[in-house]
Amino acid sequence: MFQKTFALFFLGVLLLSPNFIKAQAIKTAAPTIQAAGRNIEITLKPYKNTKIYLGTNYGQSRVLVDSTILNEASVGYFKGKEKLTPGIYFVVSPKYSILFEFLMDAGQQFKIAADTLALAEFKIIGSKENDIFSAYSKKMNQLGMQKNQLEQGFANAKTAADSANFIAQFKSVDSSFKVERQKITTTAPNSMMRFFLDVLQRPEAPAIPIINGKADSTYPFYYVKNHFWDNVVFNDNRLIRTPFFEAKVDEYFKNYVSRDPDSIIEEVQYMLTVAKTGKEIYPFLLFKFTNKYISPEFMGQDKVFLHLFQNFFSKGDTVLLNNESKKAITERAYSIMANVIGNAAPALDLNTIDNKAFSLYKQAAKYTFIAFWDPTCGHCKTEMPRVDSFYSKNWKQLGVQMIGVNTNFNELTAWKQFLTDQHFDTGWSHVYQTEAAFNAEIKAGKPTTIRQMYDVFKTPTFYLLDKDKKIIAKNLTVDQFNDFLQAQQKK
């Protein structure tokens, strides 16, 4: 079907969805022909006296960017003083279902004619880009049908000879796909179709080379990584008007970038530096990376978010943020600034359970485990005995010093009673910040020791320090900390 274009021929797995982010719909008046702006006439039968919409992609999301009311002749106009960013667009029905896709070219002065009873036959008049797109799509559709028939034949093959014959035909069809793509490169090198095909292109991994008699098994990986973005320039705003650019970014970071935060920072910095002159692509990438690393999947990657804050947001790149978002990003950055993995842990000068002075940096140990917890917290009551059990059975012999920090100075009695009832190992140091010390920090305008310096906004929160009191792990589960410590012993 023609309307499946990019879904069928580019990604293969992209499914059209009726779910949209509804941007402000623009009601258009009767058209006047003009060179500036957009003026797209659409005839969509049998709809009459009803509103239809123009949508596009914002990465892998879909947004509505315009609307028109069809008249008695089923005619309407997507019209405005400003041109839209070229890319993949689609017409949306009154019930918010996608009817068909087309290319929004740079001129944006063309006509669309379609009938819902034969959507595959919709036509676009006056757009060379869509002429190229239509011809390519029809050819891809033919090849796709051939491939489907071959797959069915291969599944029903009776003999090895039959199977071999189908495999040979598969290869022939695959070659035809490549030939058609190459035709676009040759005959329409500056077209949007060429642009989209470049974005979709994945480098083929070469054979493993033999160097000095040894196989270099890493060469194919690094070859693909180094050529993954060939012919893609990150400041091109058309990238976000496709559903496949963001997917390609995700694929790249998942498969070709180390989870090490410094490696991620290098890649993110490069993309954003190149994208900075792109009015739309730059904020898209900046916010994409911010959302991903403000609450990262893997420990330590919050360092990437901190890099974004220090190198972009704090330098004025907040024009698209409302005051609430600016505040949230700033507060989050300051809450992790003092506890990045690899940095020295913030000082902890507190009181012990019997009100003696306690200082973190006066404690000597191979490892230091710090548990911030609240004696009224139900989850803490479950997890803290488990921590104590791991300590008694496994960690004590590894030279781990245990520090339990009560985050609730209003519950000292409940705290002491819980420790007594649970028979915690005597190797613990149980400490807390007095109310007077807490209020003094607030009055002085200093970041509170526990909440901000250690990012304790939920309990329990755990940290592991090395012998120099540098943070080597944080925000893991108890079981993950145990695994981490065991792995440390093998280094």
Image (spheres, rainbow, N blue to C red):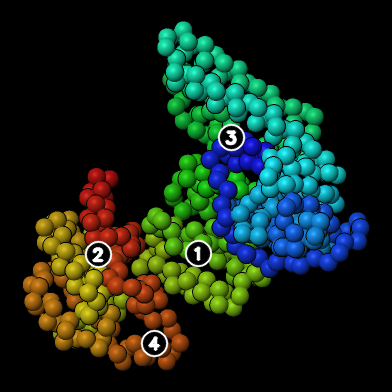
Residue 368 locus on image (x, y percent): 25, 64
User: For the residue labelled by badge 4, is the local secondary structure a helix, a strand or a loop?
Assistant: helix
- The residue that label 2 is drawn on is 368
Q: Which residue is mark 4?
A: 441
Residue at point 69% right, 23% down?
179
Amino acid type, callout 4: Glu
Residue 18 position within the rendered picture, expressed as x and y whole percent measured from the top left? 57, 55
Q: Quadrant location of residue 386?
A: bottom left
Give above or below for 458 relative to 151.
Answer: below
Mark 2 and mark 1: span between their CA atoms? 25 Å
| Residue 365 falls left or right of residue 461 | left
Find disc 3 in the rendering and name its residue: 202
The amino acid pointed to by label 3 is: Arg
Asked if the residues shown at circle 4 and circle 2 are in contact, with their CB atoms under 8 angstroms apart, the answer is no
Please name the residue that numbered disc 1 is placed on.
306
Instruction: Answer few, some or many: residues within 10 Å of disc 4's Cα (few below 14, many 20 plus, some between 14 and 19).
Output: few
The residue carrying pointer 3 sits among few (fewer than 14), some (14 to 19) or many (20 or more) residues within 10 Å by Cα, namely some
Q: Is there a contact, CB below 8 Å, between mark 1 and mark 4?
A: no
Residue nearest the observer in this picture, 285 or 301: 285
Q: CA distance from mark 3 to mark 1?
A: 31 Å
**Camera-nearest label, 3 or 1:** 3
Three-letter amino acid code of the residue under disc 1: Leu
Q: Residue at x 16, y 87 (%)?
A: 413
Spatial CA distance of label 1 from label 4 is 24 Å
In three-dimensional space, the C-alpha distance between marks 4 and 2, rounded to whole angstroms, equals: 25 Å
Q: Which residue shows up at 74% across the image and 27% down it?
A: 183
